[in-house]
Amino acid sequence: NCRAKNNAGDPTILTTHSGHGIVMVHCTQVTIEYCEATNNGWDMPRIGDGPVGIWGYEADSLIIQHCLSYRNKTSVGGADGGGFDLDGGVTNSIVQYCLSYENQGAGYCIFQYWGASPWYNNVFRYNISKDDGLVSDAMSGVYVWNSSGDKNQFYNCLFYNNTIYNTKRPAISYSETSERKNFSFYNNIFVGEDSLIKGNKGVDIFLANDWWSMTKKFNIERVHDLSQWAKKNKQEILNGKVIGLNVKPGFRNPGDAMPTSVLSLKSFNQFNIPENSPLRNKGIDLYRLYRIKTGSIDFDQQPAPIKGIGASF
C-alpha cells in the first residue's frame, strides 16, 4: 500500500542511476504488494543504467504482486526506465498479478549484470504490459539482458500466462548480451506492432503461446507463417504437433483509459479474453506436464482456466 511518485533523480550525479520508485536489495523473504510507482526518473541525465519503477537486486524470495507501475522515465539514450525488474543476483522470486504501461523502458525487465551473484529460479506470471519500452534500449514489453556474458550466471526463468501488448514495438527483445539457459515461455499472449521478437531468442522454449502482429498477423525473424516458423525453429511443438496459436486475442477494450490507482486493478478488465475464444482452452496444463504450480488464479483474482492463455479471463 505504498506509492512512489515523482522521484525525479539527481541531475548532478552522473556516475550512477537515481530516481527509482521502490527497490529492494540485500534482503530475503520480502513482499511488495498493492504498491504504485509512476513518473520516477525524469530528471536523471546520465547515459547508462537508469531507474525502474519497482524492482530488486541481490535479493532472495522476493514477491512483487498486485502492483501498478506506469510512465516511469529514463534519460534519452540511457537504459532501464522500466516498470518491474528482477535484476542481478535475484533468486527464487516471483512477479505476479502486476500491471505495467507506458514506461520508457520495458514493462518486465529480466536482467543480470556483471559482478552480480547468480540469477536463477525466478517466475513472471499473470502480468500485463501495455505499450512499454518506447524510449530506452529495451524497445519492447519484455527485455532480457545479461552483461556477465555467462549463461551459468543467468538461468531457470519461467514466464507464463502473461499478456504483453505493444502497439509500437515488439513484444520481446533480447539484448546483444543476453546469454542464458533454461528460459521457458508458456501460455502467454504476445502482441506486437510488427516483428514480435527482436534479437537472438537462443535456445529458449516457447510453447502454447498466442502470437499476433498488428501489421502482418505473424512476423518473427521475417517468417510470416506460425507453422513454418515453429517447424524451422522447433518451437511451439508438442508431441509432433504445432500447438502455438496465431489468433487475434479480441481483448475487451485495450484502448480504454488506463488505471492510475492500484485500487483500480480489482476492476481492470480491458485485457480479458472473450468467452468463446480458443485462448481459454488451447494452452497446456503446466502442472500435468511439468509439475509447475501456477497458483490457479488469474490477474483478476478469479479461477484461471487450466489451459488458459494470457493473464486475464
Image: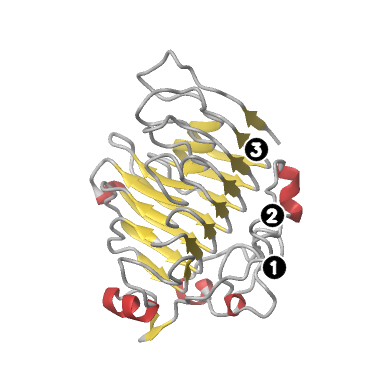
Left or right side of 198 for 100: right
Mark with earlier residue (3, 1): 3
Q: CA distance from mark 3 to mark 1?
A: 25 Å
Mark with earlier residue (2, 3): 3
**If the image is split into quadrants, where does the C terminus sit?**
bottom right
Q: Is residue 239 in view from this perspective? A: no
- Structural crowding at the residue carrying mark 2, measured as other residues with C-alpha within 10 Å and reported as few (<14), some (14–19) or many (≥20): few
Question: Which dot, 2 or 3, sits closer to the camera?
Answer: 2
Label 3, on which residue? 36
Q: Amino acid at mark 1?
A: Pro
Question: Which dot, 2 or 1, sits closer to the camera?
Answer: 2
- Structural crowding at the residue carrying mark 1, measured as other residues with C-alpha within 10 Å and reported as few (<14), some (14–19) or many (≥20): few
Describe the element under mark 3 as helix, strand or loop. strand
Q: Position of residue 229 (x, y in %)?
A: 32, 75
The count of marks equals 3
Mark seen at residue 256: 2
Looking at this view, is 180 or 30 the one in front? 180
Q: Position of residue 158 (x, y in %)?
A: 45, 59
Which residue corresponds to the image point at 43% horizontal and 13% vertical from the top-left?
12
Mark seen at residue 303: 1
Q: Amino acid at mark 3?
A: Glu
